[in-house]
Amino acid sequence: MTKPLKIFVDAHCFDESHQGSSTFIRGIYTILSHQKETDIYLGAFDTKKLQGEFPDIPDSHFFKYQAKNPLIRIGREIPHILKKHTFDFAHFQYIAPFFKPCKFIVTTHDLLFLDYQRDFPWSYTMMRRHLFKRSCQKADIRTTPSVYSQKEINKHYHIPEKDICIIPNGVDECFFDSAIDRTSALHFIEKKYGLRNYVLYVSRIEPRKNHALLLRLFLEMQLYKSGISLVFIGEESLRVNELQKVKNQIPEDAVSFFRHLPQVGHKELLWFYKAARFVVYPSRAEGFGIPPLEAAAMKVPVLCANSTAMAAFNFFGDGRFDPENKDDFYKKFNQMLLGNQDNGRLQNISDTIHHEYSWEKSACRLWASMEQNNQMMA
């Protein structure tokens, strides 16, 4: 009988605010943890939270980090864990240790800080420029979630595209199987939040995410005078001075029609999606872009930017726009406001996403990469 592969996953991203890396790890390793061919271990500071995310993994398979300094954690603590417990693979998001006691998998979700430098602080770029490159180049298996990011890794790090495995993010089954109907969602959101007729944007706040453009459109079109609200859900991870400037211009009669919720629970997010008039995703740059797919999976109308990795979301058809073109955005937004949504079209989009963005398929791709790497090294 073949011995299962022993895999360590650095899951410190679960200690931070919600982000694509944690969604990726949860989706992939929830699947792989159920395979008899794998033996999964995870490390983080908040192991109780991690155990809640992976209830089927034994408690003994969680390592509680001690080092608060990330350089000490990545430079000394994690290598010590890897050496002591003899793993076949260790999986890291972006940054891996210098010392390699086992084979490394490195997932580089994006290199947007190199292509969109104006949207990132100088310190952010400097801290990541060398570490990301070194980690990606030294990895035994390199993964990224999109063709766009694969090409950017090739361009900046000179790694052949064939040596970078595309493992897309998936959309959780709960978004497809949700029993939430729109009437119930409208009632729930109105009762708890006092919201009914609203446009929704789900994303953490950073300059590249383009929140200011959307809020400015909301004010210029005076949608609040028609009883339409604008809702942002997501924490501020990078300061956006332009957004604050626009917020300061909100007239008194519009204040109650704009709502920013730093975070909501996973179950409540489904209610927010379903009750929305439509969902907007105006981000200028993404390594993937999960929220518009989640909303569309629930058969909610979506208006999505067509740039960077989101260029692959051609199933949105006319529901796409150029986020760098204000006129195009305003035109498509107004069309979405006035148009009647075809339920058959929304169902087709949901079905396409279900077929193309599956965690089962993505987990199988990663597993196949590990098997292939083992065979090559045998």
Image (spheres, rainbow, N blue to C red):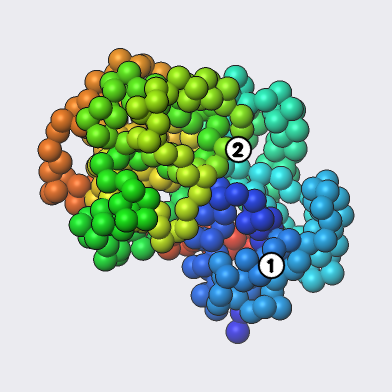
Circle 1 residue = 47
Query: How much space separates mark 2 and mark 1, taking CA atoms?
Result: 23 Å
Do we see residue 272 in this rendering? no
Q: Earlier in the sequence, mark 2 or mark 1?
A: 1
Q: Residue at x 36, y 63 (%)?
A: 174
Q: Residue at x 56, y 67 (%)?
A: 53
Q: Amino acid at mark 2?
A: Ser
Helix, strand, or loop for circle 2? loop
Helix, strand, or loop for circle 1? helix
Q: Residue at x 83, y 48 (%)?
A: 69
Q: Amino acid at mark 1?
A: Thr
Circle 2 residue = 237
Crowd around label 1: few <14 · some 14–19 · many ≥20 (10 Å): many
Please name whichever residue, 91 or 228, is drawn nearer the observer in this view of the structure.
228
* Disc number lying in front (2 or 1): 2
Quadrant occupied by the N terminus:
bottom right
Q: Is residue 215 left or right of residue 3?
A: left
Do we see residue 48 in this rendering? yes
Compared to 300, does 334 lie above or below? above
Image location (x, y in percent) of residue 177: 29, 64
Q: Is residue 85 left or right of residue 144?
A: right
Answer with the quarter of the image where residue 228 lies: top left
Image location (x, y in percent) of residue 149: 52, 36
Q: Is residue 123 left or right of residue 176?
A: right
Quadrant occupied by the C terminus:
bottom right
Please name whichever residue, 12 or 109, is drawn nearer the observer in this view of the structure.
12
Answer with the quarter of the image where residue 122 lies: top right
Please name whichever residue, 190 or 304, is drawn nearer the observer in this view of the structure.
190
Q: Residue at x 35, y 22 (%)?
A: 219
Image location (x, y in percent) of residue 261: 47, 44
